Image: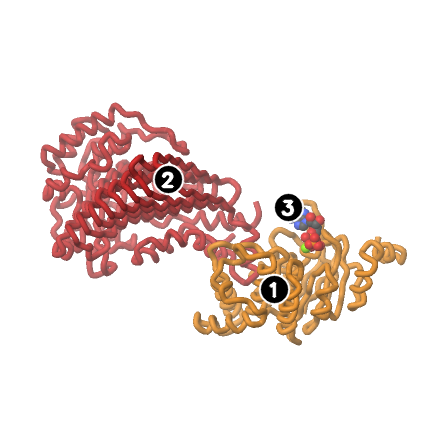
Chain colours: A red, B orange
Amino acid sequence: MSEETKALESMIGEEYKYGFTTDVEYEEFPKGISEDIIRELSTRKGEPEWMLEFRLKAYHAWKEMEEPSWFNATYKKPDFENLLYYSAPKKKPQLDSMDDVDPNIRETYEKLGIPLEEQKMLAGVAVDAVFDSVSVFTSFKEKLADAGVIFCSISEAIKEHPELVKKYLASVVPVRDNFYAALNSAVFSDGSFCYIPKNTKCPMELSTYFRINNMDSGQFERTLIVAEEGASVSYLEGCTAPMYDENQLHAAVVELVALDNADIKYSTIQNWYSGDENGKGGIYNFVTKRGICKGNNSKISWTQLETGSAVTLKYPSVILQGDNSIGEFYSVAVTTKKQQADTGTKMIHIGKNTKSTIISKGISAGQSNNSYRGEVKIGKKAHGSKNYSVCDSMLIGQECGAHTFPYISSQNPSSSVEHEATTSRVGEEQIFYLMQRGISEQDAISMIINGFVKDVLKELPLEFAVEANKLLDVKLEGSVG
Amino acid sequence: MLEIKNLHAKVEGEDIEILKGVNLKVNAGEIHAIMGPNGSGKSTLSKVVSGHPEYEVTEGEILFNGEDITELDADERAHLGLFLAFQYPVEVPGITNKTLLREAYNTIARANDREELDPLEFEDYLIEKLNVIEMKDEFLNRSINTGFSGGEKKKNEIFQMAVLNPKLSFLDETDSGLDIDALKVVSDGVNKIASNDNAIVMITHYQRLLNYIKPDFVHVMMAGKIIKSGDIKLAEELEAHGYDEMQKELALNGEAQ
Ligand SMILES: Nc1ncnc2c1ncn2[C@@H]1O[C@H](COP(=O)(O)OP(=O)(O)OP(=O)(O)O)[C@@H](O)[C@H]1O
Ligand SMILES: [Mg+2]
């Protein structure tokens, strides 16, 4: 290996900065999964009967299902009997203000750069903080309520807004959709709920910050966002976890519903712990994210910056049901060390004149494996629909892999699908060229990578663009050897 | 300014020696030309001098203003005022020419305790330098060399040289690939940049270039060595008789093995 490549690798192998553990007292809860466990979980959460029934139905469906294995990754299967499905810090059940949040937890978020006090927050961003299985705090609730926007934990929504939850929960990702979605439906512990009423532009960015702290707990969060006719919202999720030698499971379900003329922008900055250089530890990130453009002229846009997790399987998708609806997927996936990512999107065109755009940028370094898997399906009635896809991969070093698996099917001759893919290697010649002009090796690499991903990062909400750049730098910078 | 003494270099990690004892001395205010057959080591010499990590110096010294620079990284050498116009300029998608040049200019300025230019000042400065080689400003906002024609890439190298204003420049076959008009424009540009404070080493296969940029010295490189030096007449001689004949002649005189 040449000097340049070595330096690159060491940069990319930068230590994970969010790997600390928070010392909190947890409520006791038995490990494993069974009907009794689900009943207990539902009771602890004080849920209505219909919710328990939903969970039990999902549990029985899940028991009949097989764990999938069609993706491009290998890992030790999680031991579902040895997982903790509920992990809540011991604290008052009802939090009325910031002061009720466990100071250790508050400090945790502070350390992560997410202060929970409203006055310290980014202006214009409301945060729901989820710690292991429960939402510990949601900020700016009153301000949002003034605009008619509901932003709360899903547990609260189940109690306070049951008619909305009943109507939309599992309406986009059915319980039996896949193995992990079924499991999530049975045991999901918390997550965020957003409801934007008719003709309302959500006055703030909404964001949820997920933190897995407990070593034995799985995190199964559930997010549901509904934008009524003419509503619009921008939502961001961020995630980190401590460093443990054991793998932890994160199996979320996110559902988005956009009615006529509604617009949902969903951004993710995913930085779960990705394991050490030998591939020990790290999060299994097996999530199901799907949005439906139910109404005409609606739009759903997914933007993701995926840097963490040991194994990621994730395909945020859009069902383009309404005429003239638009689906977008912008993704940067960075894998280093022994990380494995199999990620991409599905665009299902059903309505007339529907459009989808896919821009995927994969960066692989170390001995990692980074796959793009995308499906574009154009239905019989999707006259005049268009898809445009670009999948670019960048390789750093000789031991990593990048793969592209596009699946395209069109049943409508008046529609068009365009797919472009490139693979490049961060060339030593490129680095030398920039260094010859006086730029340090570290800056040269940073410039090349930023140049590669900028088409995607510019899609992130302004408030988080800086954050995203910082994260990329943490991931990609370090000491030059 | 530059003194290369008995320089031997091989490909890093392999046993391929390419430079086999190069000697060269370049003073401020001078223009040198290096000619030589394909594969004789001209480009390698320019890369070794500018610090390409692919090559390892096994013997000899490279002195720049009296300082041995053999151990310096490429960027540190650039800060001292070394510049290489590449024979094959690489494409770097995603970074514009302007971004590169502003970073480069300010990094070099910082390293030399000179004042940096803010974006607005830099814009004006760039426009002024574009005129040196009659380049269109649209090239500023394009990714480095990406999709440039062969000639445009070469021109872009000289534009960068004009902006960075180096002390010592290696121009590796900058003339190859330029059309007749462009050759003249680029040569005029190089002549404008040349001064008593800097020096230029041109690598070329064609005497034609030397009609536009008059060298003070011409060197012939063969098999990893400079085997003969002289003035412009040496180039004319080569043009007339070729490298083969020169080598035979030298062998007869016992000057080369
Ligand atoms: N990294 C390398 N690995 C192996 N051989 C190399 C390497 N770099 C250069 N060489 C060899 O060294 C010799 C000199 O190459 P160089 O590019 O310096 O020649 P040149 O004089 O510039 O030729 P030209 O006039 O064709 O540009 C060539 O035979 C080349 O194949
Ligand atoms: Mg050459």
Residue A321 pos. (x, y %)? 25, 40
Q: Could one spot residue A364 in this view of the protein?
A: no
User: Which chain does tag 2 point to?
Assistant: A
- Res B5 → quadrant: bottom right
Kindly identify the amino acid type of the residue bearing the numbered disc 2. Thr
Residue sitting at x 62%, y 72%: B193
- In the rendering, which numbered label is found on residue A37? none
- In the rendering, which numbered label is found on residue B83? 1
State the SS at label 2.
strand
Q: Could one spot residue A472 in this view of the protein?
A: yes
Residue A36 pos. (x, y %)? 16, 27
Could you give the CA–CA distance between mark 1 and mark 3, rounded to whole angstroms?
26 Å
Q: Quadrant of the N terminus of chain A?
A: top right
User: Which chain does tag 1 point to?
Assistant: B
State the SS at label 1.
strand
The residue furthest right is B252
The residue under label 3 is B13
Could you give the CA–CA distance between mark 3 and mark 2, rounded to whole angstroms?
38 Å
Comparing marks 1 and 2, which lies closer to the viewer? 2
Kindly identify the amino acid type of the residue bearing the numbered disc 1. Phe
The residue under label 2 is A343
